Amino acid sequence: MTPWHDRPWRNLVAGLLYMAVVIVLATLAYADLGWHLGDAFYFVIYTIFTVGYNELHPITTPELRFVTISTIVLGCTGVIYLTGALVQFLTYAQLQQLFGNRRMKNKIGTLSGHVIVCGYGRIGHMLANELKTSGVDFVILDRDEAKLTDASARGHLTWAGDATDETVLEEVGIKKARALACVVPNDAVNVFITLSARNLNKEIEIIARGEAASTKSKLLRAGANSVVEPTHIGAERIAQLILFPQSAKLTESGRMHALAAGLHGLGLELEVTVADADHAGKSVGQIEQEADRTIFVVAVNRKTGETLTRPAPGVPVELGDGIVTITRAGRSAPRTG
């Protein structure tokens, strides 16, 4: 449960309600002792806020003195509390952002061999989920604070900035990253990101999103290793290219395309998926058996990069492994999380 002092807006509301109650009760008390309602309210306001004008009416009776003393004590206490709550309310967000950015920067500084996701739109959101399921370290880079807030709430590591800026790319560890995914819904921006990333890291794997057909060649010339066209592939394909480049590129070859076409004619599909917690620790044979022999595992791609072709039934599958399967059309392969 969040401590009370970590909820500044509630402190502010509580202070305002307290002051409203004090003002109303004091005003009614003076009115009950014979003062005009307007005079009573005016006197209460400048008494509480310690302005110190002359008294509108003589404070001579014990009742008036009691009401006045109570108004001063309770009102001044309320003003002090309300002032503190207002200052906290105005500064809390800035301080939280400052320290939050510092913590985030420290976490990013410890990353190595991670993935940088540029853009947290529809595809970026799905891609982040795929990477998280596979246990891969990644950081989301975007300029939209609302999107980053949503990503942070989902437990993702985020950084605010322009991905076309080389300084920003360095802040998210571009020189130590293993891969970068450009999934911004703007082809020109993705070309600039690719150019900047390739300039900073000659070895990094760059997977870029391209909407227009003419953009693919530009992205490849800019330094992208692979180009994804969302209308044909989607976020899962990007994750496969990042996580399992060997298996993913194997299925992209002309020979495998021909094989996939032949299998499709027989009612079968060739798929590459990521093993989730339900399949971790199970053998290839167990996975095939649980699927009632409707799938056939033809390769297992380890997270280390090792590819096991035609794995024996006793080969164990680990969390995050890539599984290349032949599946009946309409039948899902092992879930990816």
Image (cartoon, rainbow, N blue to C red):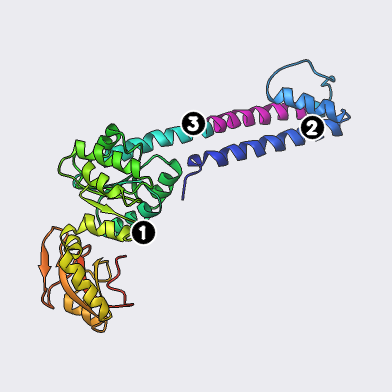
- Is 50 magenta? The answer is no
How dense is the environment of label 3, judged by Cα within 10 Å: few (below 14), some, or many (20 and up)?
few
Where does the magenta region start and end? 66-87
Figure quadrant of residue 280: bottom left
Q: Does 229 sit above or below residue 76?
A: below
What's the amino acid at mark 2?
Answer: Thr
Percent across and percent down for residue 304 are 13, 58
Give the residue at mark 1: 231
Q: Are marks 3 and 2 in contact (CB under 8 Å)?
A: no
What's the amino acid at mark 1?
Answer: Thr
Q: Is residue 317 left or right of residue 62?
A: left
The outermost residue toward the front is: 214
Residue drawn 18% across the image and 68% down it: 256
Give the residue at mark 2: 27
Which marked residue is nearer to the observer: mark 3 or mark 1? 1
Q: Earlier in the sequence, mark 2 or mark 1?
A: 2
Residue drawn 57% across the image and 42% down it: 10
Give 162 or 17, whichever is nearer the viewer.
162
Alpha-carbon span between mark 3 and mark 1: 45 Å
Q: Earlier in the sequence, mark 3 or mark 1?
A: 3
Figure quadrant of residue 63: top right
Q: Which dot marks residue 91?
A: 3
Give 313 or 296, whichever is nearer the viewer.
296
Percent across and percent down for residue 88 are 51, 32
Which marked residue is nearer to the observer: mark 3 or mark 2? 3
